């Protein structure tokens, strides 16, 4: 009733009737869970008349009445809301207001408790609880009418409902006595209510509108709950009321209780008869009803037994005793209660039924079917059932045999649950023992009883349980096997041994056999206690089975399983004997079996037989077993003689030792287990001595240990391994032995002699020799460190293993491995190390020795740690392990040897190395942690020596691979040998310590205050570079903090002598910086980023000390070396890493790179720069003299320091609040620089400079004080200092002094260094002193710029012409290589001086252009606008030269690309040698005027080379290796208004000339219109056919970027054309027909739509989405893509996302139909949804707003046509009126416009036929959906279409439109026959799709 799917018919929480009944007693118990039913014979449709207490309905409170009426609704939601409202009101209203509503509530309550919805029922009882709480005792007048459904509801199958009913009942009757009194008071009413419920049918339950299945379910649950309520009520009123201890407490009302009891009995008898003993309910298909029926019958049996009489006994007996046919396990608990009560209460009922047919047959079937799933309920009830079965009703032997047979058949061993299996065997055991104990109930006489018991034992215990135990196969085996004898042996022995094990093909789990064995042993124990002689039956079977098995045993899997079963059985017998203290298992079962079979065991080499004997010895002890074996084979008069000590030892030595050690066969392991089991702690010494003597073959054969054969060694090894296990058991307490638990007691001199012989043996080794040594040594695992020999023997064994490994190492083909081998010799060896390896010349013997040593080490590794530290063996052996493993790893990375012999040796060493590597990998952290500190240090020292030797001496392998390998080795050393940071730093100190070839630049000397001294840097050592490469890889792996900063050591307390400088390895950092480059890395690429990251992450004090120390070392080294040729590296702008690399002097280069990194990464700032500046100024002078070395390096360093020093002054000027901050420091800088300026002014002009003078150094120093910063993009370089007036005056004076000097001398005689200094001085003067320039100054500057640039222009023109001549005159496919070489020579600039000085000229020009701009602004303020006009011609000529440079390099690359890609790459790569020069060129190009660009394009066109200006621009734009600014400048020129049309379309530009809106433009194209448009070849391949793998290529690939740029140009061109121009229409048509739409898929590869879809509402936009969205919006608003292209370089994912978003937004704007068609073709719904969501959020609002604004602006309306725009609704209403006709069309723009098509709807028409109305509406739809442009244009064309139609122009019969919806042409092509005119495009489509050229109307040839 309202239950959810999957609910059971009866809730597990549902109690029996007795549990609820007991809760009503004063003693109380837990509340029962029940179910509520339906009240009355039918649904009540009117309120009940409550007699005198009923009140008129109108008296009910209006609020309560309102919600009570709502309860009559069918909707459960309405009922729940009404009940919730009632509950609230009941809490708020007074009792007086509530009492009038109780009758009406009672009526509704009776209906609601049987509602189908469980939530309604629960809420009903919650409301009832609130009601009774509110009214309290005032409920009494209505109690009798409510008690029936109230009691009934406590049996609801839903726990929440029944609990709610229980709570409401207990709320008013809190005490058990009160609850019982209430039931007594209302007994009759409850019975009436339940009686009416039991008479219900499904049809009478509710209205006809209720579904039949709901009615049936309601009826079933009402019946079951009513039956349970009836059963519980009888228990309460009849049975429990009499027995309850609280009866005396209610003696005041005994008559009421007695009357209630009589009423209950009377009503129950009537109901019992009226409902035909409730037997009809037992036939119900509902398990809940059947279970409740059994419960009510049980209650009647207990409480109303008089209802069962002769008239109904037969019927009831058949129904109850035959109840085993019940198959639903939910009913079995109540069924068993009923059957057991009935059988015990009415035993005579068995005589009234056919027991075999009605009861037993059903019972047997019940057992065979495993009780139909109720094992845990039914199995415990079996013994109770046996007790209730009358003895005369069954035949004893037959009954019990059938009982156990059927019970056994239902055991289900394979798939039963563990709990079911336990219950089963417990029941079987109890029933079997009960049958034996109660045999006298069924048998008369002792003989009859004994025979009955023997039959049960033989038939059940033996044939069923035991045979199943030993015959069935275990599921632990991989295949099903059969136990017992083979076919032949069975056949031959059928007469003598008929009780053999049968073959079964059933597989059982092991848990089944465990429970079965426990059951058998428990039954045998019970039999022993009952009648000992009964054991003989089982004992005979047990002995016969075992004897048959022993006689025919063979070494196979099935006999192993049989033996396992027997040994398990013997173990359980032993446990039983220990628990019960009896000896019967050994005396009656095991002892006789072993005695009868011992001879057979010895004669058969079967491990299973021996296992059984060994298990018996382990369980019962060696003394008892040997005693049993002896007494069963003695004469009768010797049977009572005790086994003496001599006899026991004599039998052990004479019988068991020779047998157990006799040969290596399949039973050897079992025999050795038996031998160790026979060891007795009392006689251990004598027994172990006899075992060792026999095993070493000395006791019996007199041979020496060294002559032991392989089999003897194997036996001895196996014995010792098993002995170790025994020792372990004794030590951990498993065994109680004391002598056997002492390891020293197992030592033996003969054993040690054997060990020496085996350890010193020579190849070939026996198969078990290494195994024997491993067994003796022990230590294969951490827990197995028991050694069976003395410590001296251990040392000897490991010495021999080490010698064998050393022989292998010394035979290596690697020199470094052989050299390392000499370092491994330990301190003490019993034999000289100089003889190692010399006695084994054969490589085969060497490999055998090494393999033998490996096997010994593998088996005794942990024992290696127990050796003393003085021998040095432990670190030596471990170092040898590492060394061989390293050699193997190196061998895997090199090629084969040069000859066959070398290949063979290499392969052999590689194979052995692989085994050794696997062994090395087994050494875990646990092993290294337990190694002593001394051994770890010694091992680390040896390994590091070996590694350093390898790095410096290995020359065969690839350097980078080998250093990576060494890095892995060192990391392995650190991981294994360092337990804390201090130990790690100790290992690194050993690694980095000074050697012959390390370090090269710095010598660490911690005794000196500065810590280091510099070495001669002219030495170059490749080994040093390899070591630096190794250290760099170490830093990348473990961090610079651990390698350089010595992290971990700093945490330790400092000694008095220690300083931070020697705690860190600053000298190592300086060494790496001076090395600059090494195989696989460099300072710039790896070390400096790591150092910067460390400096940012660590605490300030530690990193500051390290950085200061590094700076001091580098500065000292730089001063010593003198900064050779440092003057050439003074930069006007901040130096880049490539420029720093040009510094040749290592210390200066390292120092500059170091400072640049720290200041650029903001690790050091202004304060540090001031400190370093002051330090350098102090070092500049030594007394009064100038330090020449310091002067040479000072300009380069000041060039770095001046930027951070200048930032403070700039910020101070920007913020007045900080203007006075640290003014003293800034004044000091000004004073120093002014002094340097005066010093420079003291020299004569530069033209007089002579080599050897220091004037150049001072000029460089002055120039370095005036820095510029390169602004990213195309802006003018920015000044980085604010200089004082004195500085500016001095600087201008210096400039003019040099200018005047140049003016008085011939420039051609100037040295290059003079020109370079002059160009630099000119740059700083223009930048810092332009305001003070006079006309002479400007004239000098501009003339010099023009002259210097003209030199480069001429050079580049020559290069372009030479490239053109070379390609056009001599290019053939045969001479391509020679041509490429020649091109390389042509583009190579041998003398970089013109480019370098032109770079300064460009920088000066850029600064002067900015200065002129600012000057013009000032002139405008001063009303003097003509002041700078005189310089415009010169500037134009300079700019023309710059543009000429730009086009020259582009033309050269374009011409080269026509040859091949390699040739173009050579040209583009040549620009990278002077990348900053070309960036300055590009910056000037972008800032050029349109006129200058136009003149430059025309001049290049007139040049007459093979490629023109457009080709040159595309060559730069699509260059494979180009300067980013150059690419943007090419795009910029291509996108200009003048160049763009030429850049898109091929040379035929006739259709691009003018744009006209006259009628002629709309003339239809001919059939070949599609071929009129031809894009330029440079972009057509990217637009018409994208690269085939464009979707799979890398997202940042150059080819993909080029495709995006080509499309950007095309979209820009489309956007620049008027929307109504024919040119645009043709180009749009071309895009739709020819362009690949894959470009849109590419765009959304850069826009992460998945993150957009998964983004939560309040989260920020994910990276990529935010950039794309902003760019899409901006491109729509501005109509430009230039901003996205400008920010594209360097290409990064986010920048590509920005460009993709901008392109998508632009496509939506200019090609909406094209994008819509693409989106319609998408099949991935999630992708389409994401694209729509993105468009709707970021694109559509702006596009819609633009379209609507455009429609309002355009003048489309006239006297016949009006337009109304609704921006709020995104609608356009177009109204067309002509004469007496009118039509309104509403155009609605969707929220995701234009991805979703525009909706067109005709809202009103007048005088227009429906067909024409539909046609015009469709034509409007077609126009707006096919329009790739503004929506306003589509509306205008549609209006023109109307006008033409009203003018009488015939529509095209194909598209039914006058104007074509795509190309807007009129129908022009007429059929000669029918004269109808068609659009050319429509006719072309008709011909191509129909495959014929006939008229669509008349079908005549066209």
Image: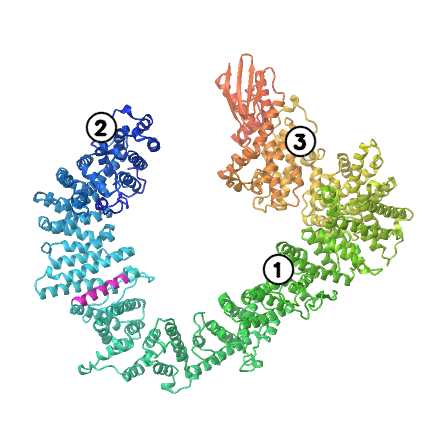
The residue that mark 1 highlights is: 1041
Badge 3 density bin: few <14, some 14–19, many ≥20, Cα 10 Å: some
Q: Earlier in the sequence, mark 3 or mark 1?
A: 1
Whether residue 515 appears in magenta in the rendering, the answer is yes
Relative vertical location of residue 1778 with respect to residue 466 in this rendering, above or below: above
For the point 85% across and 57% down, the residue is: 1254
Q: List x then y, in percent, for residue 1078.
A: 67, 61
Badge 1 density bin: few <14, some 14–19, many ≥20, Cα 10 Å: many
Is the residue under label 3 in contact with that under label 2 (CB below 8 Å)? no
Identify the magenta region.
Answer: 513-530
Location of residue 770 by image quarter: bottom left
Location of residue 1778 by image quarter: top right
Q: Earlier in the sequence, mark 1 or mark 2?
A: 2
Residue 53: give its label.
2
The residue that mark 3 highlights is: 1616
Relative vertical location of residue 779 with respect to residue 2 in this rendering, above or below: below
Judge whether residue 175 can be spotted in this image.
Answer: yes
CA separation, marks 3 and 1? 59 Å
Placement of the N terminus among the 4 image quadrants:
top left
Q: List x then y, in percent, for residue 1632.
A: 58, 33
Whether residue 1390 appears in magenta in the rendering, the answer is no
611 or 1425, nearer to the observer: 1425
Q: Is residue 1396 left or right of residue 854?
A: right
Looking at the image, the residue that sits furthest to the top is 1780
Is the residue under label 1 in contact with that under label 3 (CB below 8 Å)? no
CA separation, marks 1 and 2? 94 Å
Q: List x then y, in percent, for residue 161.
A: 29, 39
């Amino acid at each position: 009733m309202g239950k959810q799917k999957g609910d059971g018919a009866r809730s597990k929480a549902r109690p029996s009737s007795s549990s609820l009944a007991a809760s009503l007693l004063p003693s109380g118990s837990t509340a029962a869970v029940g179910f509520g039913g339906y009240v009355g014979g039918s649904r009540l449709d009117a309120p009940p008349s409550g007699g005198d207490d009923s009140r008129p309905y109108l008296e009910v409170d209006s609020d309560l009445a309102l919600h009570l009426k709502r309860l009559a609704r069918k909707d459960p939601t309405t009922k729940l809301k009404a009940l919730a409202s009632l509950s609230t009101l009941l809490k708020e209203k007074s009792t007086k207001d509530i009492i009038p509503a109780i009758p009406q509530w009672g009526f509704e309550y009776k209906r609601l408790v049987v509602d189908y919805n469980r939530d309604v029922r629960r809420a009903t009882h919650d409301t009832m609880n609130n009601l009774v709480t509110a009214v309290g005792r005032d409920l009494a007048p209505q109690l009798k009418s409510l008690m029936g459904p109230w009691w009934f509801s406590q049996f609801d199958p839903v726990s929440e409902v029944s609990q709610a009913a229980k709570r409401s009942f207990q709320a008013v009757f809190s005490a058990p006595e009160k609850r019982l009194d209430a039931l007594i008071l209302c007994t009759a009413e409850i019975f009436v209510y339940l009686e009416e419920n039991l008479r219900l049918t499904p049809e009478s339950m509710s209205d006809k509108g209720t579904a039949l299945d709901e009615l049936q379910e309601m009826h079933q649950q009402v019946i079951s709950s009513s039956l349970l309520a009836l059963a519980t009520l009888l228990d309460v009123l009849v049975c429990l009321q009499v027995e309850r201890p609280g009866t005396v407490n209610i003696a005041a009302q005994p008559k009421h209780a007695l009357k209630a009891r009589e009423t209950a009995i009377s009503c129950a008898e009537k109901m019992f008869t009226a409902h035909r003993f409730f037997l009809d309910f037992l036939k119900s298909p509902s398990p809940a009803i059947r279970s409740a029926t059994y419960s009510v019958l049980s209650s009647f049996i207990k409480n109303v037994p008089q209802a069962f009489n002769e008239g109904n006994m037969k019927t009831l007996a058949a129904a109850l005793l035959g109840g085993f046919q019940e198959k639903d396990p939910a009913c079995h608990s109540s069924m068993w209660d009923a059957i057991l009560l009935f059988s015990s209460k009415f035993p005579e009922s068995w005589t009234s039924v056919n027991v075999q047919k009605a009861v037993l047959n059903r019972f047997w079937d019940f057992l065979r079917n495993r009780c139909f799933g109720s094992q845990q309920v039914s199995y415990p009830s079996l013994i109770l059932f046996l007790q209730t079965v009358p003895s005369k009703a069954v035949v004893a032997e037959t009954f019990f045999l059938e009982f156990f047979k059927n019970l056994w058949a239902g055991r289900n061993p394979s798939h039963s649950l563990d709990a079911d299996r336990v219950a089963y065997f417990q029941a079987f055991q109890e029933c079997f023992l009960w049958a034996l104990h109660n045999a006298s109930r069924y048998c008369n006489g002792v003989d009859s009883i004994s025979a009955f018991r023997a039959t049960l034992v033989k038939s059940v215990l033996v044939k069923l349980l035991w045979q199943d135990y030993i015959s069935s196969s275990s599921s632990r085996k991989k295949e099903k096997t059969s136990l017992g004898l083979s076919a032949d042996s069975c056949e031959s022995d059928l007469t003598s041994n008929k009780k053999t094990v049968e073959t079964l093909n059933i597989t059982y789990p092991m848990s089944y056999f465990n429970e079965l064995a426990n059951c058998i042993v428990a039954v045998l124990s019970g039999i022993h206690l009952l009648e000992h002689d009964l054991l003989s039956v089982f004992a005979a079977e047990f002995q016969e089975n075992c004897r048959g098995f022993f006689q025919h045993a063979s070494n196979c899997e099935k006999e192993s399983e049989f033996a396992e079963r027997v040994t398990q059985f013997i173990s359980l017998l032993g446990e039983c004997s220990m628990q019960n203290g009896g000896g019967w298992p050994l005396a009656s079962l095991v002892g006789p079996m072993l005695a009868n079979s011992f001879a057979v065991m010895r004669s058969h080499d079967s491990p299973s037989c021996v296992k059984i004997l060994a298990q018996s010895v382990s369980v019962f002890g060696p003394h008892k077993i040997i005693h049993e074996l002896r007494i069963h084979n003695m004469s009768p008069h010797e049977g009572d003689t005790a086994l003496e000590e001599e006899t026991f030892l004599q039998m052990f030595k004479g019988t068991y030792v020779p047998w157990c050690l006799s040969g290596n066969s399949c039973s050897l392991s079992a025999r050795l287990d038996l031998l160790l089991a026979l060891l007795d702690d009392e006689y251990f010494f004598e027994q172990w001595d006899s075992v060792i003597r026999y095993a070493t073959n000395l006791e019996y054969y007199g041979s020496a240990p060294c002559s032991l054969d392989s089999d003897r060694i194997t036996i001895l090894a196996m014995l010792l391994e098993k002995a170790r296990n025994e020792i372990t058991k004794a030590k951990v307490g498993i065994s109680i032995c004391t002598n056997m638990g002492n390891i020293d007691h197992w030592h033996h001199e003969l054993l040690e002699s054997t060990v020496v012989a085996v350890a010193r043996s020579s190849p070939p080794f026996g198969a078990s020799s290494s195994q024997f040594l491993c067994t003796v040594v022990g230590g294969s695992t951490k827990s197995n460190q028991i050694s069976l020999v003395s410590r001296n023997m251990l040392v000897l064994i490991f010495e021999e293993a080490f010698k064998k490994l050393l022989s292998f190492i010394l035979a290596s083909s690697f020199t470094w491995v052989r050299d390392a081998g000499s370092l491994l010799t330990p301190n003490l060896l019993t034999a000289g190390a100089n003889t190692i390896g010399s006695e084994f010349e054969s490589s085969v013997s060497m490999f055998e020795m090494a393999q033998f040593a490996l096997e010994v080490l593998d088996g005794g590794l942990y024992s290696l740690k127990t050796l003393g530290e003085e021998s040095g063996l432990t670190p030596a052996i471990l170092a040898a392990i590492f060394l061989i493993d390293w050699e193997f790893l190196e061998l895997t990375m090199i090629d084969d040897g040069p000859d066959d012999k070398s290949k063979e040796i290499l392969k052999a060493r590689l194979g052995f190395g692989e085994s050794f590597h696997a062994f090395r990998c087994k050494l875990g952290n646990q092993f290294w942690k337990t190694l002593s500190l001394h051994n770890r240090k010694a091992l680390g020292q040896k390994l590091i020596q070996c590694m350093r030797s390898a790095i410096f001496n290995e020359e065969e392998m690839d350097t980078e691979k080998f250093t990576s390998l060494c890095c892995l080795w060192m990391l392995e050393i650190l991981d294994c040998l360092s337990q804390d940071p201090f130990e790690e730093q100790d290992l690194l100190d050993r690694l980095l310590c000074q050697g012959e070839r390390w370090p090269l630049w710095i010598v660490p000397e911690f005794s000196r205050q500065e810590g280091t001294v510099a070495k001669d840097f002219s030495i170059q050592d490749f080994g040093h570079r390899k070591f630096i490469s190794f250290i760099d890889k170490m830093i990348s792996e473990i961090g610079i903090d651990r390698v350089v900063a010595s992290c971990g050591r700093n945490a330790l307390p400092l000694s008095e002598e220690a300083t931070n400088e020697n705690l860190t390895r600053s000298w190592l950092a300086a060494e790496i910086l001076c090395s600059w480059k090494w195989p696989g890395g460099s300072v710039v690429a790896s070390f400096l980023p790591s150092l910067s990251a460390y400096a940012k992450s660590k605490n300030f004090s530690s990193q500051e000390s390290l950085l200061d120390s590094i700076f001091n070392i580098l500065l000292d080294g730089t001063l010593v070396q003198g900064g050779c040729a440092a003057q050439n590296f003074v930069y006007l702008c901040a130096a880049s890493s490539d420029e720093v690399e040009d510094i040749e002097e290592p210390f200066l280069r390292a120092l500059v790179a170091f400072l640049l990194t720290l200041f650029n990464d903001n690790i050091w700032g202004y304060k540090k720069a001031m400190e370093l500046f002051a330090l350098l100024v102090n070092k500049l002078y030594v007394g009064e003299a100038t330090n020449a070395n310091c002067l040479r390096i000072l300009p380069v360093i000041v060039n770095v320091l001046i930027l951070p020093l200048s930032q403070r002054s700039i910020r101070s000027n920007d913020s007045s609040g900080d203007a006075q901050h640290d003014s003293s420091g800034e004044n000091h800088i000004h004073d120093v620089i002014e002094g340097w300026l005066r010093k420079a002014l003291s020299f004569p002009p530069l033209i007089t400079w002579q080599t050897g003078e220091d004037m150049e150094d001072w000029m460089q120093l002055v120039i370095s004080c005036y820095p510029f910063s390169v602004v990213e993009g195309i802006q003018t370089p920015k000044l980085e200092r604010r200089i004082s007036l004195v500085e500016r005056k001095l600087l201008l004076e210096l400039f003019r002094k040099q200018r005047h000097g140049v003016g008085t001398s011939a420039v051609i005689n100037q040295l290059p260094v003079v020109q370079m200094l002059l160009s630099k001085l000119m740059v700083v003067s223009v930048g810092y002193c332009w305001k003070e320039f006079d006309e002479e100054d400007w004239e000098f500057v501009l003339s010099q710029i023009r002259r210097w640039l003209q030199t480069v222009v001429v050079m580049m023109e020559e290069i372009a012409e030479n490239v053109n001549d070379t390609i056009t005159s001599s290019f053939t496919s045969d001479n391509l290589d020679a041509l490429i070489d020649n091109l390389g020579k042509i583009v190579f600039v041998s003398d970089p001086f013109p480019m370098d000085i032109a770079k300064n000229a460009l920088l000066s020009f850029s600064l002067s252009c900015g200065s002129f701009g600012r000057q013009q602004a000032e002139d405008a303020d001063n009303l003097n606008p003509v002041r700078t006009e005189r310089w415009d011609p010169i500037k134009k000529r300079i700019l023309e030269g710059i543009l000429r440079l730009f086009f020259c390099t582009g033309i050269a690359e374009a011409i080269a690309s026509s040859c091949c890609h390699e040739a173009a790459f050579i040209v583009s790569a040549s620009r990278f040698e002077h990348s900053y020069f070309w960036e300055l060129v590009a910056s000037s190009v972008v800032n050029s005027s349109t006129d200058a660009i136009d003149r430059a394009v025309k001049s290049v066109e007139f040049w007459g080379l093979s490629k023109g200006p457009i080709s040159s621009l595309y060559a730069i734009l699509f260059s494979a290796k180009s300067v980013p600014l150059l690419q943007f400048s090419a795009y910029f020129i291509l996108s200009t208004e003048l160049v763009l049309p030429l850049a898109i379309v091929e040379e035929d530009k006739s259709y691009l000339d003018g744009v006209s809106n006259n009628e002629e433009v709309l003339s239809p194209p001919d059939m070949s219109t599609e071929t009129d448009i031809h894009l330029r070849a440079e972009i057509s391949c990217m637009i018409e056919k994208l690269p085939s793998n464009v979707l799979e290529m890398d997202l940042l690939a150059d080819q993909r970027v080029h495709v995006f740029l080509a499309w950007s140009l095309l979209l820009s061109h489309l956007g620049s054309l008027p929307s109504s121009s024919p040119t645009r229409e043709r180009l749009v048509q071309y895009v739709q027909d020819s362009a690949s739409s894959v470009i849109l898929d590419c765009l959304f590869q850069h826009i992460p739509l998945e993150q957009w879809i998964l983004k939560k509402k309040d989260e920020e936009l994910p990276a990529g989405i935010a950039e794309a969205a902003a760019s899409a919006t901006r491109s729509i608003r501005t109509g430009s893509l230039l901003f996205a292209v400008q920010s594209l370089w360097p290409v990064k994912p986010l920048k590509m996302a920005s460009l993709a978003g901008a392109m998508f937004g632009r496509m939506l704007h200019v090609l909406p139909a094209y994008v819509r068609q693409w989106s319609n073709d998408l099949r991935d719904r999630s992708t389409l949804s994401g694209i729509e969501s993105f468009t709707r959020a970021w694109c559509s609002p702006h596009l819609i707003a633009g379209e609507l604004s455009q429609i309002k602006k355009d003048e489309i309306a006239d006297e016949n046509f009006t337009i109304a725009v609704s921006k709020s609704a995104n609608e356009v209403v177009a109204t067309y009126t002509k004469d007496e006709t009118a039509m309104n069309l509403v155009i609605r723009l969707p929220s995701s416009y234009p991805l979703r098509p525009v909706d067109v709807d005709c809202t009103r028409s007048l005088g227009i036929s429906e067909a024409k109305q539909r046609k015009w509406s469709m034509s409007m739809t077609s126009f707006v959906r096919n329009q790739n442009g503004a929506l306003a244009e589509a509306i205008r064309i549609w209006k023109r279409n109307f006008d033409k139609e009203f003018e009488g122009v015939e529509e095209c019969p194909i598209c039914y439109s006058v104007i074509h919806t795509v190309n807007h042409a009129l129908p022009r092509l007429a059929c000669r026959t029918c004269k109808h005119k068609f659009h050319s495009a429509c006719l072309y489509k008709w011909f191509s799709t129909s495959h014929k050229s006939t008229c669509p109307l008349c079908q005549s040839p066209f």
